[in-house]
Image: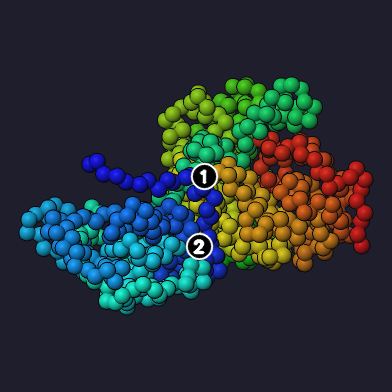
Amino acid sequence: HGQNYTIIPFNLSEYEKVSYNYTYYQPIKDVVHTKEYLDKALKGYQHIDEAIYQDKNLFVTNQNAARNSMIDIGVSTGEDWILPWDGNCFLHPNAYEALYAHLQEIPESKKYAYTPMNRAQYNEDVLTDGYQPNLIEEPQVILRHSAKARFHPLLRYGRRNKVEFLQRLKIKGPWDRWSPYLQWEKENLGPFFKPIVDLDEPTPKVGWVTRLSSGQQHLEKKGTIHERGISRSESMKSLLGKLDARVAVELHGFKPGRTLLYFQSSALSQDRQLYEQGNISVKKIVDELLILADKALRYGPWSVMDKPDHSIAASGDKHDYFHLSPYYWPPSKEAAKNPTSVWKRRDGKRYPGTNMHEPGSNNFDRTRLSDMQYNTTILSLAYFMTGKEEYAQVAARNIRTWFLAPESRMNPHMNYAQVVNGKNSNLGQSFGIIETKDFYFFLDAVHLIEEGNVFLNKTESSNLRSWFREYLNWLETSTLGKQEYTTNNNHGLFYDIQATSIASFTNDTAKMIRYIESSTSRMSSQIANNGAMIEELRRPTCEHYQMFTLQGWSTLARIARSVNRDLWLRNNRLLCNATRFTIPFLKKRNICKSKVNQSDVNVERWLPLLLDAEYQCPELRKQNIWPEWFPTLDQVQPPLIAYDMPIMFNTHDGVAPFWNLGLDRANYTLSSFTKTVPHKEK
């Protein structure tokens, strides 16, 4: 309409630098991973999210900063009165006439005025000649060009950002009865209610204005202020999620639903090039890969339907994944045959058949699932390295059989994982969800054979994402899924790993990033400032669980780098503290206390983590100490390059197969270690 206006630029790179904050408001430790938070059972639960998003929200929709900019612009252009009003304000002709007339009557000593406002439920009503406003909403504020006061710049959208100014102007209203600002707001955003030095009371009232309808009629009615607040909070969460996704895509080349998370594409391509050029280290590891891939051609496909009829879930549906809880035993041999007998826990001692590939494991689905994932991943990597189509064809067959074919597919849930016989109607436990912890590297394998839709066509790829979308919905909404999410040990961590990977695979980049960001809160809860993982130290096989959990954090950090999140830098480098505390190479410590014999610790399991320590935590270099208890001195000298480290570990160890491919620091040297055996501390 030929009007001048000013654009306040939005810079996506600057937005990325602003952090979410999980420490502002914590009514319960790690509150976002509690049942109370999920159930919205905490009083004022919406304040939790608002505190987390405070700084991001402020950067994106800082209304008070915009109001202050409007005032400054008005001053610079020499206007007498400046109206820093909300963008959805509308002046009816009668309202404009009243406003103009009233402003002419205000004496020079008055620097401020306010305009009563009504809320339109239907916008078309405002256009009628006889429109009668009901002026009960928060008024708008007007400032004379010489006014000295400004709006509070740290009050975010929806947090009484205008009301605070109204109260400073001594304008009475229902907001005077509202609860005060929260303590964290006072400490981090205050002070509030600074006196206005040039205020000449009372502040005059001028004209009236209408706030146009948002189009959501149920929120425009009287008495819906609470509902509007919740809707506003959810809308902000959605907006920030979309911006986070834009950052990943536009600034870092992330391809939703296509980017590899664990095996980094550029590094994997470099590995292939080095292999083709005959690089000795890479050729050695790829030759091992191809030996295993050729074997994998002869195995599978696998299906949940392969388990015997006498070993199925209580549902009676063989399509349901089924596995017994490993640490529960029948009270007697006779009780083992009774489905109603209550089994008892023996932590650290596995029930026969619940260990991978041992006799009896074919009665359950866990070994089958693991074999399917590992073999498919090996085949996909081999296809990428060689271009041999047979590898991709068999990998695609494995995927179809387990997830897509109606006669063999697994139902997308884990309702019967880690069943405790005789408890909870023989439903599973939340702990069983950890049995799908390896989806993160398996989904990378899927990506590797999806290119060009040759081995999995578009319909199959779409149906596979539908399966994982259903599974993620179950993970987030089921009782078992919620319980696992709130678990304060390695189970909660591995929940985050698989949820992050699945969200990415199903094109929900915003959700993927939200899981990564919230994991920083879990990190502070699981890891003490000195680096101790208290919950893992309580386990009978505590050496295993320390390694296993630290490896999980390393995995999540590796995934997070795909969207330019560096978990190693978060929480005052807490992961480096955990690395130093946990790895025996880096700290003289006793073996963790346990009644279980832990003499079978595999020292090579520490090698991937040592590489992280070298690369991510330079302050830990040259700290190698050899504890007296640490086993197998003849194996202690680590290879200095990742390519020369072991390609595979036990499936219980939490290390992806061929973890040292697609690694951007594969030829990074462990300079902390010499070629002589380190001195052995006593």
Residue 214 seen in this snapshot: yes
Q: Quadrant of residue 270?
A: top right
Left or right, 620 with reference to 162: right
Residue at the spot x=36%, y=72% of the render? 198
* Secondary structure category for the residue under label 1: helix
Q: Which mark is residue 32?
A: 2
Q: In the figure, residue 141 lies in which quadrant?
A: bottom left
Crowding near pointer 1: few (<14 within 10 Å), some, many (20+)?
Answer: few
Residue 387 placement, left or right of 635: left
Q: Is residue 322 visible?
A: no
Up-down: is 28 above or below 246? below
In the picture, the quarter occupied by the N terminus is top left
Q: Nearer the viewer, mark 1 or mark 2?
A: 1
Q: Which mark is residue 280?
A: none
Q: Which residue is mark 1?
A: 13
Q: Where is residue 646? Give x, y as percent.
A: 77, 40
Q: Position of residue 558 (x, y in %)?
A: 63, 45
**Picture residue at 86% right of the left edge, 56% below the top:** 625
Q: Would you place residue 286 above or below residue 481 in this image?
A: above
Under mark 1, the amino acid is Ser
Q: Work out whether residue 326 or residue 190 is closer to the camera in this orientation and state it.
A: 190
> Which residue sits at x=45%, y=31%?
460
